Amino acid sequence: QVQLVESGGGLVQAGGSLKLSCAASERTDSTHYMGWFRQAPGKEREFVAAITWSGAYTMHADSVKGRFTISKENAENMAYLQMNNLKPEDTAVYHCTADNSGNGSLRSVGFWAYWGQGTQVTVSS
């Protein structure tokens, strides 16, 4: 069972930046990807970004492309989400996630097996 713990959320003004961190307790033989999703009140959980465990391949949602960057530090089982030029519509709880030999689309909640408790990001206008 992979445990994920996020940190780095907070309150920021529009146009500002935040960097989220995610610490994974371990990597299993079936863990190939890590990712970030977000969920705003009254909305479904939404894909933000994903990265292979090696860090060689990344994917970002169109809504954050050019503003957010996912990265990894393999030696410490860490994943990060650098968020620049934040907008009020980025306000949400951000969840770190990891797969267990996931199948299907990385953008789908069903691909992912492990979830962190989330960290709140609030962007004021």
Image (tube, rainbow, N blue to C red):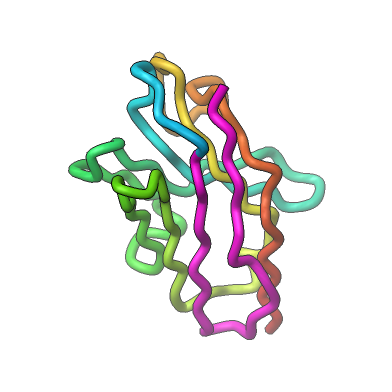
50, above or below 125, in the image: above
Residue 38, image x, y percentages: 61, 49
121, above or below 36, in the image: below
Name of the residue lying farthest toward the right: 42
The majority secondary structure of the magenta stretch comes to strand
Q: Dividing the picture into quarters, in which one does residue 114 lie?
A: top right
Residue found at x 66% / y 65%: 121
Residue 36, image x, y percentages: 50, 46
Name of the residue lying farthest toward the left: 56
Residue found at x 30% / y 46%: 74
Q: Dividing the image into 4 quarters, which one contains the C terminus?
A: bottom right
Part of the protein shown in magenta? 1-24
Q: In this rendering, would 100 be left or right of 121?
A: left
Residue 39, image x, y percentages: 68, 47
Q: Nearer the viewer, residue 77 or 90?
A: 77
Q: Nearer the viewer, residue 66 or 112?
A: 112
Residue 117: in magenta span: no
Residue found at x 69% / y 38%: 44
Q: In this rendering, would 52 be left or right of 50?
A: left
Q: Dividing the image into 4 quarters, which one contains the N terminus?
A: top right
